[in-house]
Image (cartoon, rainbow, N blue to C red):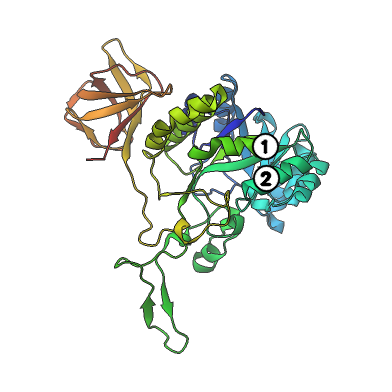
Amino acid sequence: MRKIELLVPAGSLEVLKTAVIYGADAVYIGGEAFGLRAKARNFTIAEMKQGVEFAHARGVKVYVTANIFAHNEDLEPVRNYFEELKNVGMDALIISDPGVFQIAREVLPSVDVHISTQANNTNYGTYRFWYGLGARRVVAARELSLEEIRRIRREIPEDMEIECFIHGAMCVSYSGRCLLSNYFTGRDANRGECTHPCRWNYAVMEETRPGEYLPVEETERGTFIFNSKDLCMIEHVPEMIDAGIDSFKIEGRMKTALYVATVARTYRKAIDDYRKGIEVYRANMEWYREEIGKCTTREFTTGFYFGKPGADSQIYGESTYHKNYTYLGTAESLDERGFCLIQQKNKFSAGETIEIMKPDGRNVEVTVEEIQDTDGNVQESAPHARQMVYVKLSGKPEPYDILRRSEQG
């Protein structure tokens, strides 16, 4: 069996640490420029160095995105940016644009380059092309089936790596080449500023009746005609491995630490269970389904892996996510009194029943016994976002344990 890498997103240093602790083999991050998630918090150069140091100390790789499609005015800033990256110590760059690729090879010749899914990598000839230029890995276009990926694996060099998405949001456009955001708002999706107009509600206007909007309705709330379900392949890990994929990529550099921890931990266990045997993997399927369902999701699809998506791959009645659990905070330390220090993410109160989510797969139900601010004053609740508070629980958390609350009745 090929070694399978679990590649997890991180939009901040906090989330990077969570991804590493909860099972990632590699983490991908963006700097403050030239990635395709401009609205993510992203990393300063100093934070990148901290993240790389934290990850490498635990045997985890770090990849940095620079996958915009560059315009003329971007090329010199890209070169300057790559010069700044020389001392970061990342393991690879993720690139789409051939011009940016060439600059990377000139400025950072010892750093591996992975070709982004944005480059529309749909055939083995494209893989061979990039391999000939020195790329170590190509990220498959989302529009490929598993059968097509198997063919690519057979036709490319053995030491060339294939990376494929296994979980996360799907774009209605071909490998992210959507022009709606730019047209409606002037924010270019392929330069990191997508406003996600695929999630908006639309009406039809007939040419001879300007200003008369005709609803496109599946339900009384309208129809979200471009709104795809989220990809989820937790039930098909064996097929993904059999296709010859080297890296399973989770989408979501805009996601919270709770989302990243939940997805990473679930796929980590699924991959490890499959290595023990197909029977172990199948026996734990209900646990995988239950855990992955605790994420914030839009319903799930298998994308293009088993053929072109049909009408049931879209969501017509709403654009909102379903939130089953609320992120309360991550345990940072435990003092001699048994209080853990957290930065509060959402309101919770003394007396509530919450859950400690542990990296090893355990979920421990506990009661919030007491909340104090950093001066030792007792609080009935923690209502202020990002406030540092001490929390006494009926069970003992450890550093990097996540505190969450079920919203399922």
Label 2: which residue?
149
Q: Label for residue 244?
A: 1
Residue extending farthest to the bottom is 208
Task: Describe the element under mark 1 as helix, strand or loop.
Answer: loop
Which of the two residues, 289 or 58, is positioned nearer the viewer here? 289
- What percent of the width, then of the height, locates residue 126? 76, 50
Which of the two residues, 96 or 357, is positioned nearer the viewer here? 357
Tell me whether the residue at label 1 lies in contact with that at label 2, contact meaning CB atoms closer than 8 angstroms.
yes
- What percent of the width, then of the height, locates residue 217? 36, 71
Q: Is residue 44 above or below residue 121?
A: above
Q: Residue at x 47, y 56 (%)?
A: 313
Q: Residue at x 72, y 41 (%)?
A: 153
Q: Is the N terminus in the top left, top right, bottom left or bottom right quadrant? A: top right
- Compare marks 1 and 2 and give the one earlier in the sequence: 2
Residue extending farthest to the top is 336
Q: Quadrant of residue 128?
A: top right
